[in-house]
Image: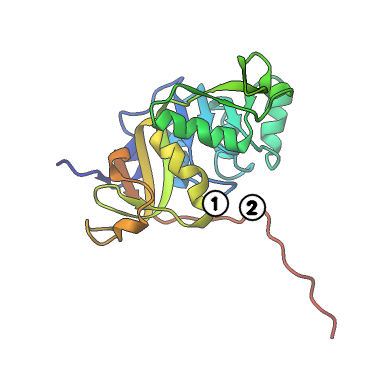
């Protein structure tokens, strides 16, 4: 079996990127984001991207760096409140935006990964989220149809993986990385540590390696999005 391990994110993305592609990106806020892949995409200059992600990073980090270079054509996100450049581009008409409730976005990714083209949910009924979407009544309740996400590429970040791609995520990083990894035609996964097969407890594995096509081990900045501390108590 050919090795899934690549030396750099740029190597792992070589031959994968193309203008106008769709990307599912893992991470929650700045937690567990695929920093190395984002930097490599910026360096490659790939443009007209449609990105599915819980959020759009901040102005100087995460997916925000791709907004700075105007490589993103459309964002499909749940929360974008920490990114001033995102707001500027959206309000000026430079950036398309599709808002999705967090649970709906996660389920759209999971559905795509499971080969499910669509599902009905009550979330968003009667709001702007429901505009233009098919409605159906089940047991007297109205639901809207949401489509599964089938991305050209998934970029995700895990804590630890073996050489076959079996992976473990840590805490909040598990929220969107796991479903995002499953819905891409190709999944590039960044990890802090790669071990040999059999070294991970099978019961602890969150993502089976069959979903992962390329692996990169690296070092990560791990910024804190909102740092809060207690006020110093007076003596």
Front one among 235 and 26: 26
- Residue holding disc 2: 225
* Residue of label 1: 31
Which of marks 2 and 1 precedes in the sequence? 1
Q: CA distance from mark 1 to mark 2?
A: 8 Å
Q: Are marks 1 and 2 in contact (CB under 8 Å)?
A: yes
* Residue 14 vs residue 34, the one in the foreground: 34
- Residue name at image x 74 percent, y 22 percent: 126
Q: Is residue 111 left or right of residue 81?
A: left
Residue found at the very far front of the displayed protein: 139
Which type of secondary structure does the marked residue at label 1 adopt?
loop
Q: Does any portion of residue 141 appear in the rendered image? A: yes
* Residue 152 spot, x, y in % from top left: 40, 26
Q: Quadrant of the C terminus?
A: bottom right
Residue 37's spot in the image, x, y percent? 42, 41
Indicate the position of residue 127 as horizontal and vertical percent values: 74, 24
Q: Residue at 38% of width from left, 26% of height from top?
A: 115
**Residue that appears at 41% across and 51% down:** 158
Q: Split into 4 quadrants, where in the image is the N terminus?
A: top left
């Amino acid at each position: 079996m050919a090795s899934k391990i690549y030396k750099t994110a740029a190597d792992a993305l070589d031959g994968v990127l193309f203008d106008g592609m769709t990307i599912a990106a893992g991470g929650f806020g700045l937690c567990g984001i695929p920093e190395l892949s984002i930097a490599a995409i910026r360096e490659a200059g790939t443009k007209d991207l449609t990105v599915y992600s819980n959020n759009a990073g901040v102005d100087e980090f995460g997916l925000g760096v791709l907004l700075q270079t105007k490589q993103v054509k459309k964002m499909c996100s749940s929360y974008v409140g920490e990114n001033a450049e995102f707001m500027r581009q959206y309000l000026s008409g430079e950036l398309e935006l599709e808002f999705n409730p967090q649970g709906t976005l996660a389920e759209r990714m999971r559905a795509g990964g499971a080969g499910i083209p669509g599902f009905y949910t009550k979330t968003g009924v009667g709001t702007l989220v429901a505009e233009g979407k098919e409605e159906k009544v089940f047991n007297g309740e109205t639901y809207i149809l949401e489509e599964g996400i089938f991305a050209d590429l998934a970029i995700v970040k895990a804590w630890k993986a073996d050489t076959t791609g079996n992976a473990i995520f840590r805490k909040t990083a598990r929220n969107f990385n796991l479903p995002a990894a499953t819905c891409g035609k190709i999944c590039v996964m960044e990890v802090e540590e790669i071990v040999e097969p059999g070294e991970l407890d099978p019961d602890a594995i969150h993502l089976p390696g069959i979903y992962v096509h390329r692996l990169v081990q690296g070092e990560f900045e791990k910024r804190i999005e909102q740092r809060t501390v207690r006020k110093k108590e007076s003596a």
